[in-house]
Amino acid sequence: MNPEFRAKIARKVLAALLAVGTVAGFASGFHDLRRHGCHAGGRAPTFEDRVAATCVRAAENARSDRERAPRERDPRGRTRRRPATRAKSLRHAQSAAD
Protein backbone atom coordinates (compact mmCIF):
# COMPACT_ATOMS: atom_id res chain seq x y z
CA MET A 1 0.00 0.00 0.00
CA ASN A 2 1.14 3.52 -0.76
CA PRO A 3 2.21 5.43 2.41
CA GLU A 4 0.29 8.54 1.32
CA PHE A 5 -2.87 6.51 0.82
CA ARG A 6 -2.39 4.83 4.19
CA ALA A 7 -2.01 8.25 5.88
CA LYS A 8 -5.21 9.51 4.23
CA ILE A 9 -7.14 6.46 5.40
CA ALA A 10 -5.75 6.78 8.94
CA ARG A 11 -6.70 10.46 9.02
CA LYS A 12 -10.25 9.70 7.88
CA VAL A 13 -10.64 6.89 10.39
CA LEU A 14 -9.35 9.12 13.20
CA ALA A 15 -11.72 11.94 12.19
CA ALA A 16 -14.65 9.50 12.14
CA LEU A 17 -13.77 8.11 15.58
CA LEU A 18 -13.46 11.60 17.04
CA ALA A 19 -16.82 12.59 15.53
CA VAL A 20 -18.54 9.48 16.91
CA GLY A 21 -16.96 10.08 20.34
CA THR A 22 -18.12 13.70 20.36
CA VAL A 23 -21.70 12.78 19.43
CA ALA A 24 -21.76 9.95 21.99
CA GLY A 25 -20.39 12.26 24.71
CA PHE A 26 -23.00 14.92 24.07
CA ALA A 27 -25.76 12.29 23.94
CA SER A 28 -24.62 10.88 27.28
CA GLY A 29 -24.54 14.35 28.82
CA PHE A 30 -28.00 15.26 27.58
CA HIS A 31 -29.37 11.95 28.80
CA ASP A 32 -27.87 12.58 32.23
CA LEU A 33 -29.36 16.09 32.32
CA ARG A 34 -32.76 14.77 31.36
CA ARG A 35 -32.64 12.00 33.96
CA HIS A 36 -31.15 13.97 36.88
CA GLY A 37 -31.92 17.58 36.01
CA CYS A 38 -29.51 20.46 35.65
CA HIS A 39 -28.50 20.70 39.28
CA ALA A 40 -28.14 16.98 39.99
CA GLY A 41 -29.84 17.35 43.35
CA GLY A 42 -29.73 13.63 43.97
CA ARG A 43 -25.96 13.50 43.79
CA ALA A 44 -25.18 16.61 45.83
CA PRO A 45 -25.43 15.00 49.30
CA THR A 46 -23.15 12.16 48.23
CA PHE A 47 -20.59 14.63 46.90
CA GLU A 48 -20.78 16.71 50.09
CA ASP A 49 -20.28 13.61 52.23
CA ARG A 50 -17.24 12.62 50.18
CA VAL A 51 -15.72 16.11 50.50
CA ALA A 52 -16.36 16.16 54.25
CA ALA A 53 -14.75 12.74 54.67
CA THR A 54 -11.71 13.92 52.71
CA CYS A 55 -11.37 17.02 54.90
CA VAL A 56 -11.64 14.97 58.09
CA ARG A 57 -9.03 12.50 56.84
CA ALA A 58 -6.66 15.35 55.93
CA ALA A 59 -7.09 16.94 59.38
CA GLU A 60 -6.44 13.61 61.11
CA ASN A 61 -3.30 13.07 59.00
CA ALA A 62 -2.03 16.55 59.83
CA ARG A 63 -2.68 16.00 63.54
CA SER A 64 -0.89 12.65 63.56
CA ASP A 65 2.08 14.17 61.66
CA ARG A 66 2.38 16.93 64.25
CA GLU A 67 2.19 14.48 67.12
CA ARG A 68 4.84 12.23 65.60
CA ALA A 69 7.46 14.87 64.87
CA PRO A 70 7.09 18.11 66.81
CA ARG A 71 8.97 20.97 65.24
CA GLU A 72 11.21 23.37 67.08
CA ARG A 73 9.91 26.88 67.53
CA ASP A 74 11.93 30.06 67.68
CA PRO A 75 11.34 32.68 70.42
CA ARG A 76 8.68 34.40 68.30
CA GLY A 77 6.68 31.17 68.05
CA ARG A 78 7.40 30.52 64.38
CA THR A 79 8.36 27.13 63.06
CA ARG A 80 12.01 26.66 62.09
CA ARG A 81 12.11 25.30 58.58
CA ARG A 82 14.50 27.60 56.74
CA PRO A 83 17.52 25.81 55.32
CA ALA A 84 20.93 27.16 56.21
CA THR A 85 22.48 29.46 53.67
CA ARG A 86 25.75 28.55 52.01
CA ALA A 87 27.69 31.11 54.05
CA LYS A 88 26.34 29.72 57.33
CA SER A 89 27.10 26.15 56.32
CA LEU A 90 30.64 27.13 55.29
CA ARG A 91 31.19 28.90 58.63
CA HIS A 92 29.88 25.85 60.46
CA ALA A 93 32.21 23.56 58.47
CA GLN A 94 35.20 25.82 59.17
CA SER A 95 34.45 26.01 62.90
CA ALA A 96 34.09 22.23 63.05
CA ALA A 97 37.44 21.78 61.29
CA ASP A 98 39.27 24.05 63.81
Image (cartoon, rainbow, N blue to C red):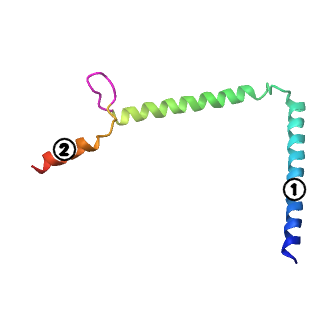
Give SS at disc 1: helix
Which residue is depicted at the point 35% across and 36% down?
A: 69
Instruction: Tell me the quarter of the image containing the N terminus.
Output: bottom right
Residue 92's place in the image compared with 80, above or below, is: below
Residue range in magenta is 71-79
Q: Which mark is residue 38?
A: none
Q: Position of residue 23 (x, y in %)?
A: 90, 45
- Give the residue pinned by disc 1: 15
Amino acid type, residue under disc 2 in the picture:
His
Which residue is depicted at the point 36% across and 36% down?
A: 68
Determine whether, in the image, residue 47 is placed left or right of residue 63: right
User: Dot 2, crowdedness within 10 Å: few (<14), some or many (≥20)?
Assistant: few
Residue 69's place in the image compared with 45, above or below, is: below
* First in sequence: mark 2 vs mark 1: 1
Residue 21's place in the image compared with 28, above or below, is: below
Specify the principal SS of the magenta part: loop
- Give the residue pinned by disc 2: 92
Determine whether, in the image, residue 45 is placed left or right of residue 51: right
Q: Position of residue 40 (x, y in %)?
A: 80, 27
For this rendering, which residue is in front, 81 or 72?
A: 81
Determine whether, in the image, residue 42 is placed left or right of residue 65: right
Give SS at disc 2: helix
Which residue is depicted at the point 24% across and 44% down?
A: 89
Amino acid type, residue under disc 1 in the picture:
Ala
Give residue 25's quadrant in the image: top right
Residue 16's place in the image compared with 42, above or below, is: below
Give residue 30's quadrant in the image: top right
Residue 57 shown in magenta: no
Q: Position of residue 54 (x, y in %)?
A: 58, 32
